Image: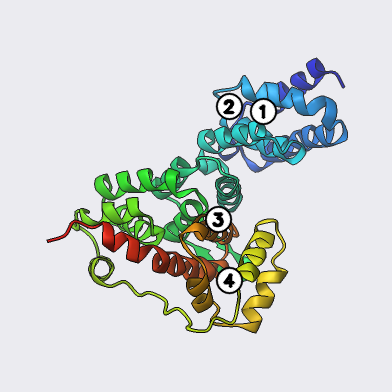
Amino acid sequence: MTCAAFKGQLRRTYGFRPAQLDAQAQARKIELMDGVWNAVHRESAALGPCLKEALAGTTDDGWFLFDGGQLLVAVDDSRDAKELLLKGLARVELDDVDLRTWVARASRLGLDGLDTAELGRRWLLYPEAKYFLPEHVYEVDRGTGARFLFGAADERFATPVLTRLAREATDEVKETAVWLLMSQATPEALGVLRGVDRTGLSQQAIASLDALAKAPRLIEPRAQPKTTRAELVAAFTALLRGDEAPFERLVEAVPDGERDVVAVCTAADLELLRKVRRYYAAKNNPHALDFYDQFSQIIMTLVWETHQKQLPQG
């Protein structure tokens, strides 16, 4: 198929919003979209670049940017392709999407190093921010979805957006932003939290802010570690490549291995530990969030002493 013919197929297929169609019309559009996907998968070398060009030239068709962006990254793993999907995630109407898919795509881009913080903000402000995970019998609510999205994003992108929300938002959105800042364990986030306006926050959030300012719950390093730094670094590096087995073996052998992590790892390992934490946030399930919380505590333990030394004295 020529690029010109394929672009004609795109014009005939897109230019609609799923939420505005009845079931019969949606079925027809699904059939047409399947045709587009099948064509690109059959002729990815020829049609992938053509699809990329069409997406790059589109600004006003949010559904095409979203659906076409997903198709593009299925055949093109480049940074440019991911940037186009990011544009689609930002432009598509959330009423039109499967929210589970949208959150998964957004958090994966965050893990890949793209700036997805505004997508996290968009989720927090969306009135219907929730979806269900049937395999876990678990509802992802506004706060949990925000943990997936902001947790998977690089903190240098996430912190400024969360700071703005903590200062400007109200009610549940402000509370969620404050909780997320507390979990970040970065000097910037800790600095913001010292001056956050507590108006409207729950008593639990206020108590946690007080505890964080005075004496957060830190992990006691093991005097005689059972795991070496080399073993941990190797396991974490493998995990970030998608091989979870080495880390799982360490967890099974030493269930309280977090005590070894804070004993043998140093500030030089913080970026690796933050990447591991992002990896678990991007898995988008409640079990992975247990690891996210554990790595948050590990990171806080490693940064706390330095943070205290940097605070103004007197």
Q: Residues within 10 Å of mark 2 (few under 14, many from 20)?
A: some
Residue type marked 2: Asp
Residue 115 at x, y percent in the picture:
50, 40
Q: Which of the marked residues, 2 or 3, is nearer the chain's N terminus?
A: 2
Q: CA distance from mark 4 to mark 2?
A: 34 Å
Residue 195 at x, y percent in the picture:
20, 53
Quarter of the image where the C terminus is located:
bottom left
* Residue carrying label 2: 61
Residue type marked 4: Val
Q: Splitting the image into 4 quarters, where does residue 212 fall?
A: bottom left
- In the rendered structure, are the residues bearing label 2 and label 3 in contact, judged by CB atoms less than 8 Å apart? no
Residue 168 lies left or right of residue 269; in this view the side is: left
Q: Residues within 10 Å of mark 4 (few under 14, many from 20)?
A: few
Find residue 137 and name its label. 4
Residue type marked 1: Tyr
Give the vertical position of 133 relative to 109 (above or below).
Answer: below
- In the rendered structure, are the residues bearing label 2 and label 1 in contact, judged by CB atoms less than 8 Å apart? yes
Find residue 65 and name its label. none
Q: Nearer the viewer, residue 292 or 2?
A: 292
Give the vertical position of 63 relative to 125 (above or below).
Answer: above
SS state under label 4: loop
* Residue carrying label 3: 275
Residue type marked 3: Lys
Give the vertical position of 247 relative to 253 (above or below).
Answer: above
Q: Splitting the image into 4 quarters, where does residue 227 fall?
A: bottom right
* Residue carrying label 1: 14
Q: CA distance from mark 4 to mark 3?
A: 28 Å
Q: Which of the marked residues, 1 or 3, is nearer the chain's N terminus?
A: 1
Q: Which of the marked residues, 4 or 3, is nearer the chain's N terminus?
A: 4
- The structure residue drawn at horizontal position 34% and vertical position 65%, both measured from the top left corner, is 304
Q: Nearer the viewer, residue 119 or 194?
A: 194
